[in-house]
Image (spheres, rainbow, N blue to C red):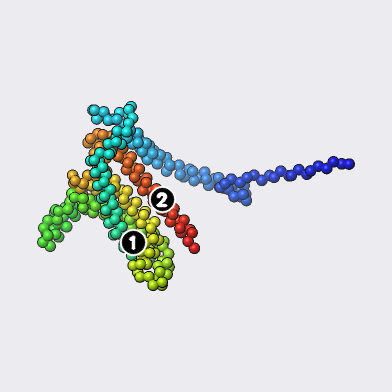
Amino acid sequence: MPSRRRAKPEATQQTAARPNEPASATPNELDAQRRARRTGTLIATPGALYLLIFFMVPLGLITVYSFATRTSTGRTSLSGWNLDSYERIADDVILGIIARSAWLAFLTTVLCLVVAYPFAYYLATRPPRLRARLLVLVMIPFWTNGLVRVFAIRFLLGSNGPASALSEAMGFGTFRILFTPTAVVLGMVYGFLTFMVLPLYVALERMDWRLVEAARDLYASGAKAFWKVTVPLTRSGIVAGCVLVFVPSFGSYVVPEILGGAKTLLIGSYVARQFQAARNWPLGAALSVLIIVAMLVAVAVNQRNSANAERTGAAAP
């Protein structure tokens, strides 16, 4: 009696598909995908090298110097690493400068938000042709050198400038605001206002205005519809604009140097003086690392807010 043998299962010739490659892709399609990845890598290589050489390497050097030792002759020694520079940040003088910088940056951010939101709202609700013209007006300051614009503000706020002449003509006397914290805030608002307008405009322009109409149909007033519908829907633009304004305002150097005085020393100017006049590179590097960490935290907050906004938009019907 012939013995019964079980039929062996035929060996499948299909190979497991890669995570990024569909199982039904043909060999030609897979080759095209690989060529596209290689092309993308080649295109991204110059930018990656640029960031590595001119961003990551200087950042690493600054971090190394923040742990260095300043000798009695003013030289920087990399032999004995320590945390003395970071401990000096807790001094009352430096903490006062950091607090002043944060306070003026906060005022700048609030003023930019108050001024930019109505303009961005008006801009987003205009016809396309007028909207394009207004956007050009918003971008015009970027076509001028920032240093020239700061000196223009200095001339306007000076004792011999148009603001002082107008004040004297109205009987209020000489307009004395230059070299004060107020002049620094006005200069930073003028310099960073565009960074607040553009994110707000993008958020308002992409907003679903039918939700506002629905709120009005449900007998909500204009103010209530604005606070309950418009503001929450544009939260991503508000957060992005606040980050884009607060971060450069906190570490601003040019505006406080030109428009501020001895009582308006901010963290950016203090760091520059440590590298130039005081020759205290470890302390200047430690403060630079502090500013960089603050910027990274702000960017992380912005990224998280953008991700939450995308998830909310995707979950919406």
The one of 140 and 301 positioned closer to us in this rendering: 301
- Is residue 92 visible in the rendered image? The answer is yes
Distance CA(mark 1)–CA(mark 2): 22 Å
How dense is the environment of label 2, judged by Cα within 10 Å: few (below 14), some, or many (20 and up)? some
Q: Position of residue 126 (x, y in %)?
A: 35, 66
Residue 163 sits in quarter? bottom left
Q: Position of residue 210 (x, y in %)?
A: 43, 68
The one of 197 and 48 positioned closer to us in this rendering: 197
Which residue is the site of mark 1?
120
Which label sits on residue 307? none
Tag 1: residue type? Ala
Q: Secondary structure at mark 1?
A: helix
First in residue order: circle 1 vs circle 2: 1
How dense is the environment of label 1, judged by Cα within 10 Å: few (below 14), some, or many (20 and up)? many
Q: Is residue 48 left or right of residue 251?
A: right
- Is residue 187 visible in the rendered image? The answer is no
Residue 223 sits in quarter? bottom left
Which residue is the site of mark 2?
303
Residue at 38% x, 64% y is 228
Q: Position of residue 259 (x, y in %)?
A: 20, 49
Residue at 32% x, 43% y is 291
Residue at 27% x, 39% y is 90
Q: Position of residue 278 (x, y in %)?
A: 23, 35
Q: Residue furthest right?
A: 1
Q: How many marks?
A: 2
Residue at 48% x, 43% y is 42
Which label lies toward us, 1 or 2?
A: 2
Residue 266 sits in quarter? top left
